[in-house]
Image (cartoon, rainbow, N blue to C red):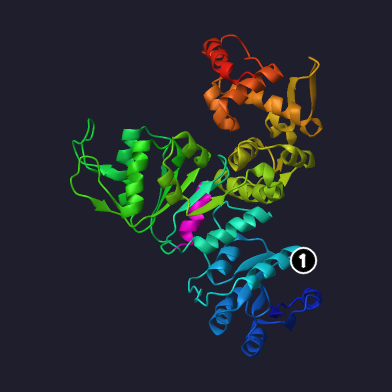
Amino acid sequence: MSKILIVDDDLASCRTLQLHLQSQRHEVVVAHSVDHGLDVARLLQPELLILDIRMPGRSGLDGLPDFKQQNPTTRVIMITAFHDMESTIDAMQKGADDYIHKPIDIDEMDTSIGKLLAVPSSGEDLLSTSAAVEVNNLTLVGRSRVMKEVFKTIGMVAKSPATILITGESGTGKELVARAIHRAGQHPEGPFVAVNCAALVETLLESDMFGHEKGSFTGAVRRQEGKFTLARGGTIFLDEIGEMSLSMQAKLLRVLQYKEYTPLGAKQVQTTDARMITATNVDLEQRVRDGGFREDLYYRLQVVNIHLPPLRERKEDLMDLIQTLLGRINRELHRNVTHIARDVVDCLENYQWPGNIRELENVLMKSVALSRGDNITRDLLPPTLCKERGPHPDGESWDKPIAQWSLEEMERSHIQRVLDATLWHKGQACEILSISRPRLRRMIRQYHLTPPDSGVPGCEEEEDEDKINDRPEQG
């Protein structure tokens, strides 16, 4: 049995939660304002506080520091009917242990209470005196459970110096998460410097990251500072870290271990205090097993791992994302497109979004730009978004909504589209589909896929190589 204090102005919600917790043999006391709750907590010394965020008078967020100062060992669960990332991050930074949305899922509440009461408090002062984190202009939106966990993690790790690895498919918003961590961190006023490790060849990447001296290589007509120098006092974000060469990985490992680096052509070592956040859309563990990524660097990078799910796995966030993106696109294009036809919503919800949020933003941008009024209609969407055209299993042609396709039909159509889009470059297709080359070859044979014409360069030669490479797999 534990002592639990509920502070919430919603009388019905309080009573329901009180009866449920009392049935589990907890001692439960209720207060309906922050000031009353502080008086009760002073006498009760509860092990757990369930605190509503928005109440008349002082809000739960305003009162949370006072609760933590008065009862530093009390565990805190914040509850709210509103879905906004900045409140979640602010609550976690001010000492909350969990954050649950209304209407309260009793199973979720029981799980949270069980975890918090099972782990003794460290007694540390988790109070943060910072104001609410300003992240309203970031398109990082979500009310799905997995995104709520992402927001909580941002709040818990932002002010720590831990190195963070963000994983997820292309277009899921990894840089936005990195920027949110930076803005919620110890030095939000410092620079945020992003580097795309896949965009430059090795020599240029080294110069871009560490800088170079005049005359250090052909074309180096002046001294140039690198991104690690520019990021001092702030954050450096290394995107597509999985594409970095082994020699560059060794140099990066030294930066992580000793906070020092040497610009190209320089003799003097420089130091950096920049916080490092990295991101990748590939499986780094598999890269380690394949010998393409250093194991020691991998473990250094993923002290904290934040995984962003693809949009197809968080469809409950789709309408919130559309609303947020439309608002920004309207401002950028000086338009006022605010309505979406019902059949358009059906198309958007049924589509699998292989390009994730970036693809959604592109679709909305084009639709707003082409719209003649304030409404997005179906004719403004790309033809492949609402319906697929492809070969029927029996060899006939057809035209029907995605929702009526089988999983096998959808897989066949998508693989054909990816191959056509990459001009049948199987390496690129494997990267997009996140499958191995042997598996792609098997699926091409299984679905009888063919290039759109015989003029696609390299197809015949590569197919001969495929037959040779396939021999060890037979049987």
Q: As rendered, which of 383 and 328 lies closer to the eye?
A: 383
Q: Position of residue 209 (x, y in %)?
A: 33, 43
Q: Which region of the structure is painted magenta?
A: 175-185
**Magenta portion: prevailing SS class:** helix
**According to the image, label 1 marks what residue?**
106
Amino acid at dot 1: Ile
Position of 43 relative to 407 (above/below): below
Measuring from the top left, give residue 131's x and y in whole percent: 50, 70
Res. 88 visible in picture: yes
Residue 285 placement, left or right of 205: right
Secondary structure beneath label 1:
helix
Residue in the picture at 77% in, 79% down: 25
| Residue 299 placement, left or right of 46 | left
**Residue at horizontal 54%, vertical 53%?**
138
Residue 338 seen: no
**Residue 451 picture quarter:** top right
Residue 182 magenta: yes
The quadrant of the picture occupied by the N terminus is: bottom right
